[in-house]
Amino acid sequence: MILGEELSAQIQRVIREQRHAGRILEHGLAPRRKLLLVGPSGTGKTLTASVLAGELGLPLLQVRLDGLITKFMGETAAKLRQVFDATAKTRGVYFFDEFDAIGSQRGLANDVGEIRRVLNSFLQMIEQDRSHSLVIAATNHPDLLDPALFRRFDDVLHYDLPVQAQIAKLLKVRLASCTEETTQWARLAKAATGLNYAEVARAADEVLKDALINRRDCVREPDILVMLEERKTISDRLNDKTVL
């Protein structure tokens, strides 16, 4: 993962505390294990959950909120209770993606009664949870979350779009072994400003596939630039549709 120093330090701190959880618990303290990840899509939130699971040797269990939410009163909360019961029985990393689906502010005009009840249930369950599992929630829209949620998490990790230096580093990791020595990574990173990590990685993969199809041993800078610009065009169109 290519992240900023502050965010990287937060993730490393979670890993250290989990690895020394026994010692921490012996002294009446608790290791960080309830995390809220906020930031734009494609910036590493899902990958963070995967990395934590891998580093700690735990299974990654993704909770599909679209499968939890139903129109029947009480059914969604009951399913949520099953998830939290599982955290005590099976230690793992429980990842709630697109968390704003149930974590939206209770006062929103378009809120419905069932979602309010689910949110209240989640607040109670996460506060009462004393398991040794990691509970991770991620959202692209922190402004929609109920303020009461933030207090229930041990740490809030903020994700941002990559800066030029991070874009250049990601491109090098993906492509340096098969590019010309004269490739100007800084110039390419400048052209890719505004893309998220996932989009930059996808552009790099597209360049590699194109080189393989055309039987080229070397990836050229103009080819990389074309793919980055293509991803920017696609991203801009998607953003325009989102605004509309």
Image: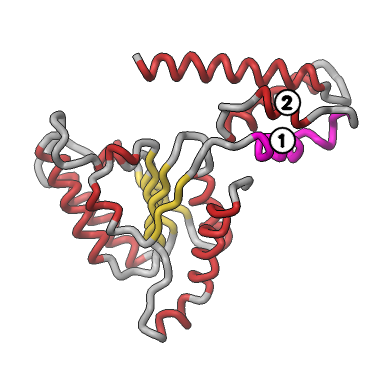
Residue 214 as seen in the image, left or right of residue 123: right
Q: What secondary structure predominates along the stretch shown in magenta?
A: helix
Task: Judge by depth and name the residue closer to the eye, 20 or 154.
Answer: 154
- Marker disc for residue 188: 2
* Residue in the image at 26% along x and 52% along y: 149
- Residue type at numbered disc 1: Ala
Q: Is residue 35 magenta?
A: no
* Residue in the image at 71% along x and 40% along y: 169
Give the x, y percent position of residue 104: 23, 40
Give the x, y percent position of residue 36: 38, 51
Say if 166 sits above or below 14 in the image. above
- Residue type at numbered disc 2: Leu
User: Magenta residues?
Assistant: 164-180
Q: Label 2: state its secondary structure.
A: helix
Name, please, the residue furthest toward the bottom.
Answer: 26
- Marker disc for residue 107: none
**Residue 57 image-quadrant placement:** bottom right
Residue 44 as seen in the image, left or right of residue 112: right
Residue 21 as seen in the image, left or right of residue 154: right
Residue highlighted by disc 1 = 168
Is mark 1 in CB contact (under 8 Å) with mark 2?
A: yes
Give the x, y percent position of residue 89: 34, 67
Quarter that holds the C terminus: top left
